[in-house]
Structures are given as C-alpha cells and as structure tokens.
Image (tube, grey):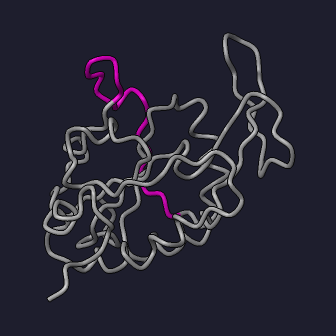
Amino acid sequence: MDSEDEGRKCLVLDLDETLVHSSFKIIPNPDFVVPVEIENQYHNVYVLKRPGVDEFMRKMGEQYEVVVFTASLSKYADPVLDMLDIHKVVKHRLFREACCNYKGTYVKDLSQLGRDLSGAIILDNSPASYLFHNANAVPISTWFNDPHDTELSDLVDFLQDLSKVDDVTSILNTNLNNELSFPTR
C-alpha cells in the first residue's frame, strides 16, 4: 500500500460491463480501440466507456485506494486500463489468474488484497464475482451501451459517504437487496 493510501478504504472495481463494454466486433464510435494478441495474431477490441466513468474514477481516486479486479486476461485488460485510467488512480490491477474458480465461475476473493475487509468494497455487475464477500458488495447493473446510463454518477455520493464509516460491511450488509442508502437515525 502506498503511504498516500494509508488509512483509506479500498475500492475494488470490476472492468467489463461495469466500467466499460468491449467487443471484437466493430462498434460504431468506440471510445478507443485496443489491439490484443491472440494465438500470435492481433485483433482489435472496440471499447465503449460507461457514461460518467472518467469523473467517477477521478472522484473515487480522491477518496479510496482504487483497485481493478477483473476476470479478464491481462493481455486484454492491461491495455484497456492504460487507456481508461486517464487520472492514474488505479493503484493495483488483478486479473483472471487472481480469481478463484468456484464451481466453474470466477470469484474474486478480496482476502487476497491483504486489506482489512471492514474497509474493502467491491463494485461489480456480477453477483457471482463477490460470492465470498456479499457484505462488501455494491451491486451495479450490467452495462453494454446505454448512453443515458447514470449509475456510476448516481453512486458517487453514496461511495463518498461510505469512505467515512468505520466498517463498510455494517452498511452494505443491511443494504443487500435493498436500495443503497445509509440508515436513518
């Protein structure tokens, strides 16, 4: 952990269908195109950024130690993150090989982070990904290309507030399957 992240909570972000949507098929007006080598041949990957992702990443980088944990392979995800992380807020990148294969599903085991889990949050569109850590999860819908999507922007205030609580699981566990909000006093 960098000294600047000392005392900060850890926000673990999924990549595909959470922050971006990528396709080997041509997408009209992609935000960027990344060449990826597969079996000694390069293929273009067309990438769309979820609306609000740049500002979301900037704001989360001010509050959290930001980690991207993806079930994708590094040869694809690394160049996508190089293009996506324009504010240079992602401190660590974890890829498919860091996932646990549980009953044929890639699960992200947050205990691998070496962080106190009371201060770790995972934002992911796939509930299977946080199967081991439901109490740390902030669910988000799967995003493909809706230009009117506002979920990342809508989560900013909640996540900023969450960065100030002692134990994120005390809030997230009570909000599971409910609207994300802080309990009223």
152 vs 180, nearest the viewer: 180
Residue 29 placement, left or right of 40: right
Query: Residue 80, image x and y in percent?
Result: 64, 43
Quarter of the image where the C terminus is located:
bottom left
Query: Residue 65, image x and y in percent?
Result: 36, 64
* Residue 16 in the image: above or below residue 85: above
Residue 145 placement, left or right of 8: right
Query: Residue 184, image x and y in percent?
Result: 19, 85
26 vs 78, nearest the viewer: 26
Residue drawn at the location 17% of the way across and 55% of the way down: 117
Q: Is residue 7 magenta?
A: no
| Figure disc tally | 0
Residue drawn at the location 15% of the way across and 57% of the way down: 116
Residue drawn at the location 86% of the way across and 49% of the way down: 29
Farthest residue to the front: give it. Answer: 178
* Residue 34 in the image: above or below residue 31: above
Quarter of the image where the N terminus is located:
bottom left
* Residue 94 in the image: above or below residue 105: below
Residue drawn at the location 67% of the way across and 10% of the way down: 39
Q: Is residue 99 magenta?
A: yes
Q: Quadrant of residue 40?
A: top right
* Residue 145 in the image: above or below residue 183: above
Query: Residue 162, image x and y in percent?
Result: 28, 74
Q: Quadrant of residue 58?
A: bottom right
Q: Where does the magenta region start and end?
A: 89-106
Residue 138 placement, left or right of 48: left
